[in-house]
Image (cartoon, rainbow, N blue to C red):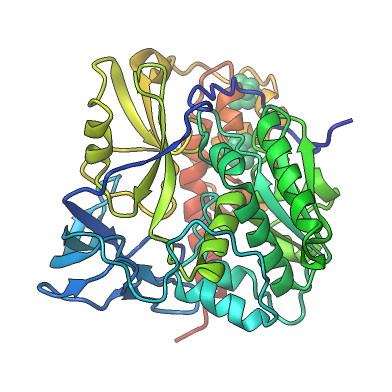
Protein backbone atom coordinates (compact mmCIF):
# COMPACT_ATOMS: atom_id res chain seq x y z
CA UNK A 1 0.00 0.00 0.00
CA UNK A 2 1.51 3.34 -1.05
CA UNK A 3 1.75 6.00 1.62
CA UNK A 4 0.12 9.39 1.75
CA UNK A 5 -0.90 11.95 4.38
CA UNK A 6 -3.80 11.12 6.64
CA UNK A 7 -6.00 14.25 6.77
CA UNK A 8 -7.92 15.76 3.84
CA UNK A 9 -6.48 16.45 0.42
CA UNK A 10 -7.94 16.50 -3.09
CA UNK A 11 -7.23 14.92 -6.47
CA UNK A 12 -7.05 17.59 -9.17
CA UNK A 13 -6.20 16.46 -12.71
CA UNK A 14 -2.40 16.67 -12.81
CA UNK A 15 -2.16 18.12 -16.36
CA UNK A 16 1.60 17.51 -16.62
CA UNK A 17 1.55 18.36 -20.32
CA UNK A 18 5.14 19.63 -20.33
CA UNK A 19 6.51 16.47 -18.67
CA UNK A 20 8.14 15.19 -21.86
CA UNK A 21 10.04 18.43 -22.56
CA UNK A 22 13.76 18.19 -21.84
CA UNK A 23 15.34 21.14 -20.05
CA UNK A 24 16.52 23.66 -22.63
CA UNK A 25 18.87 26.51 -21.76
CA UNK A 26 17.25 29.87 -22.45
CA UNK A 27 19.61 32.33 -24.18
CA UNK A 28 20.77 35.07 -21.81
CA UNK A 29 18.73 38.29 -22.31
CA UNK A 30 20.37 41.67 -23.07
CA UNK A 31 19.45 43.02 -19.63
CA UNK A 32 18.63 41.32 -16.32
CA UNK A 33 16.94 42.83 -13.25
CA UNK A 34 17.99 41.05 -10.09
CA UNK A 35 15.73 41.48 -7.07
CA UNK A 36 17.21 41.95 -3.60
CA UNK A 37 14.09 40.29 -2.10
CA UNK A 38 14.23 36.74 -3.41
CA UNK A 39 14.08 34.91 -0.11
CA UNK A 40 12.13 34.75 3.11
CA UNK A 41 13.48 37.22 5.68
CA UNK A 42 15.20 40.57 5.29
CA UNK A 43 15.92 41.67 1.71
CA UNK A 44 19.60 41.68 0.75
CA UNK A 45 21.50 44.99 0.65
CA UNK A 46 22.85 45.85 -2.80
CA UNK A 47 26.64 46.15 -2.72
CA UNK A 48 27.16 47.36 -6.29
CA UNK A 49 26.45 50.72 -7.91
CA UNK A 50 25.70 52.03 -11.40
CA UNK A 51 28.80 51.80 -13.58
CA UNK A 52 30.33 48.80 -11.77
CA UNK A 53 31.51 45.87 -13.87
CA UNK A 54 30.33 42.49 -12.58
CA UNK A 55 31.05 38.88 -13.44
CA UNK A 56 28.67 35.93 -13.44
CA UNK A 57 28.46 34.56 -9.90
CA UNK A 58 29.71 37.75 -8.22
CA UNK A 59 27.99 38.84 -4.99
CA UNK A 60 25.78 41.88 -5.66
CA UNK A 61 23.62 41.68 -2.52
CA UNK A 62 24.56 40.82 1.05
CA UNK A 63 22.26 39.39 3.74
CA UNK A 64 20.84 41.91 6.21
CA UNK A 65 20.08 39.55 9.07
CA UNK A 66 20.12 35.99 10.35
CA UNK A 67 17.24 35.09 8.02
CA UNK A 68 18.36 36.63 4.74
CA UNK A 69 20.55 35.48 1.84
CA UNK A 70 23.32 36.48 -0.55
CA UNK A 71 22.32 37.46 -4.07
CA UNK A 72 24.70 36.99 -7.00
CA UNK A 73 24.88 38.39 -10.48
CA UNK A 74 23.51 35.86 -12.96
CA UNK A 75 25.40 37.47 -15.85
CA UNK A 76 28.56 39.45 -16.62
CA UNK A 77 28.28 43.06 -17.68
CA UNK A 78 27.77 46.60 -16.42
CA UNK A 79 25.43 47.67 -13.64
CA UNK A 80 23.09 50.28 -15.14
CA UNK A 81 21.04 51.10 -12.06
CA UNK A 82 20.14 50.07 -8.53
CA UNK A 83 16.61 51.06 -7.62
CA UNK A 84 12.97 50.20 -7.26
CA UNK A 85 11.25 48.07 -9.89
CA UNK A 86 7.92 46.27 -9.74
CA UNK A 87 7.77 42.56 -8.99
CA UNK A 88 5.20 40.15 -10.49
CA UNK A 89 2.33 41.50 -8.42
CA UNK A 90 3.34 45.13 -8.91
CA UNK A 91 5.09 45.77 -5.57
CA UNK A 92 8.21 48.00 -5.87
CA UNK A 93 11.36 46.13 -4.79
CA UNK A 94 15.05 47.08 -5.08
CA UNK A 95 16.57 45.50 -8.20
CA UNK A 96 20.05 45.65 -9.71
CA UNK A 97 19.81 46.24 -13.46
CA UNK A 98 22.72 44.75 -15.40
CA UNK A 99 23.42 45.15 -19.11
CA UNK A 100 24.90 41.89 -20.31
CA UNK A 101 28.40 41.76 -21.86
CA UNK A 102 29.70 38.27 -22.69
CA UNK A 103 29.52 35.61 -19.97
CA UNK A 104 32.61 35.87 -17.80
CA UNK A 105 32.35 33.82 -14.59
CA UNK A 106 34.04 34.51 -11.26
CA UNK A 107 37.22 32.57 -10.64
CA UNK A 108 36.84 29.48 -8.48
CA UNK A 109 33.47 28.40 -9.90
CA UNK A 110 33.50 24.98 -11.56
CA UNK A 111 31.23 25.30 -14.61
CA UNK A 112 32.01 21.81 -15.96
CA UNK A 113 29.51 18.93 -16.00
CA UNK A 114 31.87 16.57 -14.15
CA UNK A 115 30.06 14.88 -11.26
CA UNK A 116 31.85 15.45 -7.94
CA UNK A 117 30.91 12.74 -5.44
CA UNK A 118 33.45 13.16 -2.61
CA UNK A 119 31.56 14.53 0.39
CA UNK A 120 33.55 17.11 2.43
CA UNK A 121 34.13 15.93 6.01
CA UNK A 122 33.53 19.25 7.72
CA UNK A 123 29.81 20.17 8.11
CA UNK A 124 30.76 23.82 8.68
CA UNK A 125 32.51 23.96 5.30
CA UNK A 126 29.32 22.62 3.67
CA UNK A 127 27.05 25.11 5.46
CA UNK A 128 29.37 28.02 4.67
CA UNK A 129 29.35 27.16 0.98
CA UNK A 130 25.53 26.86 0.98
CA UNK A 131 25.28 30.27 2.65
CA UNK A 132 27.90 32.09 0.58
CA UNK A 133 26.33 30.77 -2.64
CA UNK A 134 22.89 32.11 -1.75
CA UNK A 135 20.97 28.82 -1.63
CA UNK A 136 17.34 29.12 -0.56
CA UNK A 137 14.49 26.61 -0.45
CA UNK A 138 13.09 26.12 -3.94
CA UNK A 139 9.88 24.36 -2.95
CA UNK A 140 8.05 27.67 -2.63
CA UNK A 141 9.09 29.19 0.69
CA UNK A 142 12.63 30.38 -0.31
CA UNK A 143 13.79 30.04 3.31
CA UNK A 144 17.61 30.32 3.53
CA UNK A 145 18.86 26.72 3.38
CA UNK A 146 21.87 27.21 5.66
CA UNK A 147 19.53 28.37 8.46
CA UNK A 148 17.18 25.41 8.01
CA UNK A 149 20.10 22.99 8.17
CA UNK A 150 21.27 24.41 11.52
CA UNK A 151 18.41 23.92 14.01
CA UNK A 152 18.79 25.23 17.57
CA UNK A 153 20.89 22.95 19.84
CA UNK A 154 17.81 21.65 21.70
CA UNK A 155 16.27 20.33 18.47
CA UNK A 156 17.68 17.30 16.69
CA UNK A 157 16.71 15.84 13.33
CA UNK A 158 16.78 12.10 12.69
CA UNK A 159 15.51 12.20 9.11
CA UNK A 160 15.93 14.35 6.02
CA UNK A 161 13.00 14.20 3.60
CA UNK A 162 13.47 15.36 0.02
CA UNK A 163 10.30 16.64 -1.57
CA UNK A 164 9.97 15.26 -5.08
CA UNK A 165 6.17 15.19 -4.92
CA UNK A 166 5.56 18.16 -7.24
CA UNK A 167 1.86 17.74 -6.54
CA UNK A 168 0.68 21.02 -8.09
CA UNK A 169 -0.96 20.46 -11.47
CA UNK A 170 1.04 21.52 -14.58
CA UNK A 171 4.47 21.91 -12.89
CA UNK A 172 7.21 19.66 -14.26
CA UNK A 173 10.50 21.40 -13.42
CA UNK A 174 11.24 19.12 -10.45
CA UNK A 175 10.23 16.10 -12.53
CA UNK A 176 12.71 17.04 -15.25
CA UNK A 177 15.64 17.61 -12.89
CA UNK A 178 14.92 14.24 -11.22
CA UNK A 179 15.23 12.61 -14.65
CA UNK A 180 18.10 14.69 -16.02
CA UNK A 181 20.20 15.37 -12.89
CA UNK A 182 19.40 12.57 -10.41
CA UNK A 183 22.97 11.95 -9.23
CA UNK A 184 23.59 15.62 -8.47
CA UNK A 185 20.38 15.62 -6.38
CA UNK A 186 21.52 12.54 -4.46
CA UNK A 187 24.94 14.11 -3.80
CA UNK A 188 23.11 17.21 -2.51
CA UNK A 189 21.09 14.95 -0.20
CA UNK A 190 24.28 13.31 1.11
CA UNK A 191 25.78 16.76 1.81
CA UNK A 192 22.72 17.80 3.84
CA UNK A 193 22.70 14.40 5.57
CA UNK A 194 26.30 15.09 6.69
CA UNK A 195 25.37 18.52 8.05
CA UNK A 196 22.31 17.25 9.93
CA UNK A 197 24.06 14.12 11.15
CA UNK A 198 21.06 11.97 10.24
CA UNK A 199 21.23 8.34 9.12
CA UNK A 200 18.18 8.32 6.88
CA UNK A 201 17.12 10.30 3.81
CA UNK A 202 13.80 9.63 2.07
CA UNK A 203 13.10 11.07 -1.36
CA UNK A 204 9.29 11.20 -1.61
CA UNK A 205 7.94 11.04 -5.18
CA UNK A 206 4.31 10.60 -6.24
CA UNK A 207 3.26 7.51 -8.19
CA UNK A 208 2.42 9.51 -11.33
CA UNK A 209 6.17 10.02 -11.97
CA UNK A 210 7.49 6.49 -12.62
CA UNK A 211 10.47 7.69 -14.71
CA UNK A 212 11.60 10.01 -11.91
CA UNK A 213 11.15 7.25 -9.33
CA UNK A 214 13.32 4.96 -11.47
CA UNK A 215 16.07 7.51 -12.19
CA UNK A 216 16.32 8.68 -8.56
CA UNK A 217 16.32 5.08 -7.33
CA UNK A 218 19.10 4.13 -9.73
CA UNK A 219 21.16 7.18 -8.73
CA UNK A 220 20.79 6.42 -5.01
CA UNK A 221 21.80 2.79 -5.61
CA UNK A 222 24.77 3.66 -7.83
CA UNK A 223 26.16 6.20 -5.36
CA UNK A 224 25.63 3.87 -2.38
CA UNK A 225 28.00 1.49 -4.16
CA UNK A 226 30.64 4.26 -4.40
CA UNK A 227 30.87 5.36 -0.76
CA UNK A 228 29.25 4.81 2.66
CA UNK A 229 28.48 8.54 2.60
CA UNK A 230 25.52 7.56 0.44
CA UNK A 231 24.09 4.88 2.71
CA UNK A 232 20.54 5.30 4.02
CA UNK A 233 19.22 7.26 1.03
CA UNK A 234 16.03 5.73 -0.36
CA UNK A 235 13.20 6.62 -2.72
CA UNK A 236 9.63 6.27 -1.45
CA UNK A 237 6.73 6.09 -3.89
CA UNK A 238 3.77 8.06 -2.57
CA UNK A 239 0.13 7.88 -3.52
CA UNK A 240 -0.88 10.86 -5.64
CA UNK A 241 -2.75 13.41 -3.54
CA UNK A 242 -2.62 17.20 -3.31
CA UNK A 243 -1.00 18.91 -1.30
CA UNK A 244 1.49 16.13 -0.66
CA UNK A 245 4.37 18.59 -1.14
CA UNK A 246 3.34 20.59 1.95
CA UNK A 247 6.01 20.02 4.59
CA UNK A 248 3.62 18.80 7.27
CA UNK A 249 1.76 16.56 4.81
CA UNK A 250 4.99 15.05 3.48
CA UNK A 251 6.27 14.28 6.97
CA UNK A 252 2.95 12.62 7.80
CA UNK A 253 3.07 10.60 4.56
CA UNK A 254 6.67 9.42 5.01
CA UNK A 255 7.04 8.86 8.78
CA UNK A 256 3.50 9.33 10.15
CA UNK A 257 4.55 12.12 12.52
CA UNK A 258 2.20 15.06 13.11
CA UNK A 259 3.58 18.58 13.44
CA UNK A 260 1.49 20.49 15.98
CA UNK A 261 -0.31 23.78 15.40
CA UNK A 262 2.27 26.56 14.79
CA UNK A 263 5.01 23.92 15.10
CA UNK A 264 7.97 23.24 12.81
CA UNK A 265 9.12 19.99 11.14
CA UNK A 266 12.20 19.94 13.39
CA UNK A 267 9.83 19.58 16.40
CA UNK A 268 9.20 16.02 15.18
CA UNK A 269 12.82 15.39 14.17
CA UNK A 270 12.41 16.03 10.45
CA UNK A 271 13.95 18.46 7.98
CA UNK A 272 12.30 18.79 4.56
CA UNK A 273 14.08 20.13 1.48
CA UNK A 274 12.93 20.24 -2.12
CA UNK A 275 14.77 18.21 -4.78
CA UNK A 276 15.61 21.46 -6.61
CA UNK A 277 17.17 22.79 -3.39
CA UNK A 278 19.24 19.61 -3.18
CA UNK A 279 20.51 20.26 -6.70
CA UNK A 280 21.37 23.85 -5.72
CA UNK A 281 23.22 22.50 -2.64
CA UNK A 282 25.23 20.19 -4.90
CA UNK A 283 26.18 23.10 -7.16
CA UNK A 284 27.03 25.37 -4.22
CA UNK A 285 29.21 22.90 -2.32
CA UNK A 286 30.76 20.67 -4.97
CA UNK A 287 31.11 23.31 -7.70
CA UNK A 288 31.22 26.53 -5.65
CA UNK A 289 28.51 27.69 -8.03
CA UNK A 290 26.01 30.26 -6.69
CA UNK A 291 22.27 29.96 -7.25
CA UNK A 292 22.06 32.06 -10.40
CA UNK A 293 19.66 30.02 -12.52
CA UNK A 294 16.73 27.63 -12.13
CA UNK A 295 14.40 25.45 -14.17
CA UNK A 296 11.10 27.09 -15.11
CA UNK A 297 8.12 25.25 -16.62
CA UNK A 298 6.24 27.28 -19.24
CA UNK A 299 2.90 25.62 -19.90
CA UNK A 300 -0.90 25.69 -20.23
CA UNK A 301 -3.31 24.07 -22.71
CA UNK A 302 -3.59 27.34 -24.65
CA UNK A 303 0.21 27.70 -24.91
CA UNK A 304 1.59 26.10 -28.07
CA UNK A 305 5.19 25.53 -26.96
CA UNK A 306 5.32 23.52 -23.72
CA UNK A 307 8.78 23.97 -22.19
CA UNK A 308 11.11 23.45 -19.29
CA UNK A 309 13.77 26.14 -19.50
CA UNK A 310 16.97 26.77 -17.55
CA UNK A 311 16.63 30.50 -16.90
CA UNK A 312 19.13 32.98 -15.45
CA UNK A 313 17.73 34.70 -12.34
CA UNK A 314 16.56 38.22 -13.21
CA UNK A 315 15.32 37.39 -16.72
CA UNK A 316 12.18 39.38 -17.60
CA UNK A 317 9.15 37.08 -17.86
CA UNK A 318 8.19 38.90 -21.07
CA UNK A 319 11.55 37.83 -22.58
CA UNK A 320 10.80 34.16 -21.81
CA UNK A 321 7.34 34.45 -23.34
CA UNK A 322 8.62 36.25 -26.46
CA UNK A 323 11.28 33.57 -26.91
CA UNK A 324 8.52 30.95 -27.00
CA UNK A 325 6.29 32.86 -29.43
CA UNK A 326 4.39 35.38 -27.32
CA UNK A 327 1.25 35.35 -25.20
CA UNK A 328 -1.43 33.16 -26.81
CA UNK A 329 -4.58 35.03 -27.87
CA UNK A 330 -6.80 32.82 -25.74
CA UNK A 331 -4.82 33.33 -22.52
CA UNK A 332 -6.79 35.29 -19.93
CA UNK A 333 -4.47 34.89 -16.95
CA UNK A 334 -0.75 34.25 -16.42
CA UNK A 335 0.29 32.60 -13.16
CA UNK A 336 3.65 32.13 -11.45
CA UNK A 337 3.51 28.69 -9.83
CA UNK A 338 0.65 26.20 -10.13
CA UNK A 339 -3.09 26.83 -10.38
CA UNK A 340 -3.75 25.88 -6.74
CA UNK A 341 -1.15 28.00 -4.93
CA UNK A 342 0.41 30.19 -7.63
CA UNK A 343 0.21 33.97 -7.86
CA UNK A 344 -1.34 35.83 -10.79
CA UNK A 345 1.32 37.77 -12.68
CA UNK A 346 0.06 41.32 -13.15
CA UNK A 347 3.37 42.64 -14.50
CA UNK A 348 4.90 40.59 -17.33
CA UNK A 349 8.01 42.82 -17.30
CA UNK A 350 8.83 41.54 -13.81
CA UNK A 351 11.98 39.45 -13.54
CA UNK A 352 12.31 35.82 -12.47
CA UNK A 353 13.52 35.01 -8.96
CA UNK A 354 15.48 32.07 -7.56
CA UNK A 355 12.16 30.49 -6.58
CA UNK A 356 10.29 30.99 -9.87
CA UNK A 357 9.12 27.54 -10.90
CA UNK A 358 6.64 28.18 -13.68
CA UNK A 359 4.80 30.50 -16.00
CA UNK A 360 1.30 29.09 -16.54
CA UNK A 361 -1.22 30.37 -19.09
CA UNK A 362 -4.91 29.85 -18.32
CA UNK A 363 -7.93 30.62 -20.49
CA UNK A 364 -11.00 32.54 -19.41
CA UNK A 365 -12.97 29.31 -19.10
CA UNK A 366 -10.28 27.92 -16.77
CA UNK A 367 -10.21 30.97 -14.52
CA UNK A 368 -13.77 32.28 -14.48
CA UNK A 369 -15.37 31.75 -11.10
CA UNK A 370 -19.01 30.75 -10.83
CA UNK A 371 -21.23 33.16 -8.87
CA UNK A 372 -21.10 32.52 -5.14
CA UNK A 373 -24.21 30.97 -3.55
CA UNK A 374 -25.12 30.22 0.07
CA UNK A 375 -23.23 27.65 2.13
CA UNK A 376 -25.22 24.43 2.18
CA UNK A 377 -23.26 23.02 5.13
CA UNK A 378 -22.14 20.02 3.14
CA UNK A 379 -18.81 19.86 4.99
CA UNK A 380 -16.78 19.17 1.82
CA UNK A 381 -14.34 21.98 2.60
CA UNK A 382 -13.60 20.52 6.05
CA UNK A 383 -13.19 17.04 4.58
CA UNK A 384 -10.68 18.40 2.06
CA UNK A 385 -8.64 20.56 4.46
CA UNK A 386 -5.25 18.87 5.03
CA UNK A 387 -4.75 20.91 8.21
CA UNK A 388 -7.95 19.67 9.83
CA UNK A 389 -9.52 23.15 9.85
CA UNK A 390 -13.16 24.10 9.30
CA UNK A 391 -12.98 26.47 6.33
CA UNK A 392 -16.74 27.23 6.32
CA UNK A 393 -16.42 28.48 9.92
CA UNK A 394 -13.19 30.41 9.26
CA UNK A 395 -14.87 32.09 6.29
CA UNK A 396 -17.82 33.16 8.45
CA UNK A 397 -15.54 34.44 11.23
CA UNK A 398 -13.36 36.27 8.71
CA UNK A 399 -16.32 37.99 7.11
CA UNK A 400 -17.42 39.16 10.56
CA UNK A 401 -13.91 40.31 11.56
CA UNK A 402 -13.82 37.98 14.60
CA UNK A 403 -10.06 37.86 15.15
CA UNK A 404 -10.00 36.13 18.56
CA UNK A 405 -12.27 33.35 17.32
CA UNK A 406 -10.20 32.98 14.13
CA UNK A 407 -7.07 32.46 16.22
CA UNK A 408 -8.86 29.98 18.51
CA UNK A 409 -9.88 28.05 15.39
CA UNK A 410 -6.24 28.02 14.18
CA UNK A 411 -6.58 30.12 11.01
CA UNK A 412 -2.82 30.68 11.39
CA UNK A 413 -2.25 27.00 10.49
CA UNK A 414 -3.80 27.41 7.04
CA UNK A 415 -1.20 26.50 4.39
CA UNK A 416 -3.17 28.31 1.65
CA UNK A 417 -3.42 25.12 -0.39
CA UNK A 418 -6.82 25.97 -1.86
CA UNK A 419 -8.35 22.50 -1.25
CA UNK A 420 -11.39 24.11 0.41
CA UNK A 421 -12.05 26.43 -2.50
CA UNK A 422 -11.54 23.55 -4.94
CA UNK A 423 -14.15 21.43 -3.10
CA UNK A 424 -16.87 23.98 -2.41
CA UNK A 425 -20.06 23.43 -4.46
CA UNK A 426 -21.30 26.91 -3.48
CA UNK A 427 -18.24 28.58 -5.07
CA UNK A 428 -17.51 30.53 -1.89
CA UNK A 429 -14.08 32.23 -2.18
CA UNK A 430 -12.87 30.46 0.95
CA UNK A 431 -9.16 30.75 0.18
CA UNK A 432 -9.36 34.51 -0.37
CA UNK A 433 -11.21 35.29 2.86
CA UNK A 434 -9.18 32.84 4.95
CA UNK A 435 -5.83 34.00 3.53
CA UNK A 436 -6.59 37.63 4.40
CA UNK A 437 -7.78 36.72 7.90
CA UNK A 438 -4.69 34.57 8.45
CA UNK A 439 -2.44 37.52 7.58
CA UNK A 440 -4.21 39.72 10.12
CA UNK A 441 -4.15 37.08 12.87
CA UNK A 442 -0.43 36.39 12.34
CA UNK A 443 0.24 40.13 12.68
CA UNK A 444 -1.66 40.13 16.00
CA UNK A 445 0.25 37.06 17.25
CA UNK A 446 3.59 38.62 16.28
CA UNK A 447 2.77 41.93 17.93
CA UNK A 448 1.99 40.02 21.15
CA UNK A 449 5.25 38.07 21.10
CA UNK A 450 7.53 40.87 19.78
CA UNK A 451 10.05 42.17 22.36
CA UNK A 452 8.94 45.49 23.89
CA UNK A 453 11.05 48.48 22.77
S1 LIG B 1 -6.54 26.79 2.13
FE1 LIG B 1 -6.32 26.65 4.36
S2 LIG B 1 -8.38 26.33 5.13
FE2 LIG B 1 -8.41 25.88 2.92
S3 LIG B 1 -8.06 23.70 2.79
FE3 LIG B 1 -6.04 24.65 2.63
S4 LIG B 1 -5.27 24.69 4.72
FE4 LIG B 1 -7.47 24.30 4.85
S1 LIG C 1 -17.88 23.25 1.01
FE1 LIG C 1 -18.82 25.26 0.71
S2 LIG C 1 -21.00 24.82 0.88
FE2 LIG C 1 -19.98 23.05 1.75
S3 LIG C 1 -19.77 23.50 3.96
FE3 LIG C 1 -17.90 24.26 2.99
S4 LIG C 1 -18.35 26.41 2.56
FE4 LIG C 1 -20.31 25.43 2.92
Q: Is residue 171 visible?
A: yes
Instruction: Name the quadrant containing residue 224.
Output: bottom right
Q: Position of residue 168 (x, y in %)?
A: 56, 33
Q: Is residue 401 visible?
A: no
Instruction: Name the quadrant containing residue 279.
Output: bottom right
- Ligand 2 shows up in the quarter that is top right
Whether 342 is drawn above or below 110: the answer is above
- Who is closer to the viewer here, 149 or 179? 179
Q: Position of residue 125 (x, y in %)?
A: 59, 81
**Image quadrant in which the N terminus is located:** top right
Q: Residue at x 43, y 66 (%)?
A: 290
Q: Residue at x 22, y 55 (%)?
A: 32
Query: Total of numbered circles in the picture?
Result: 0
Q: Position of residue 348 (x, y in %)?
A: 24, 39
Q: Position of residue 184 (x, y in %)?
A: 60, 55
**Image quadrant in which the C terminus is located:** bottom left
Q: Is residue 364 left or right of residue 430?
A: left
Q: Is residue 48 left or right of residue 216?
A: left
Whether 410 is drawn above or below 71: the answer is above
- Who is closer to the viewer here, 8 or 404? 8
Kindly give the residue lying farthest to the right in the view shown.
Answer: 1
Q: Is residue 240 left or right of residue 329?
A: right
Q: Residue at x 30, y 21 (%)?
A: 332
Whether 223 is drawn above or below 53: the answer is above
Amino acid sequence: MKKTFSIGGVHPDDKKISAGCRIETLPVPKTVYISMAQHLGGPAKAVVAAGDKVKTGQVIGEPTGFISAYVHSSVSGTVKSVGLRKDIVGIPVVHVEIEVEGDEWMEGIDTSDTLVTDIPQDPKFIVDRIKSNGVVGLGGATFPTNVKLCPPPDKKADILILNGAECEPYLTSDYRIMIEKPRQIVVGAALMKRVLGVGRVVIGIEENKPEAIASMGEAAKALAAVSPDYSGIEVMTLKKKYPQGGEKQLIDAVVHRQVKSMGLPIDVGAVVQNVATSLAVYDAVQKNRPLIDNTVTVTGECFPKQSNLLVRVGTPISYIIDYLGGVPETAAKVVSGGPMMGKAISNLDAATLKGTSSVLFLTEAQTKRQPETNCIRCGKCAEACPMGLEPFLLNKLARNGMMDELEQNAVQDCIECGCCLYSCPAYIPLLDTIRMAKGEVIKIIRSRTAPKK
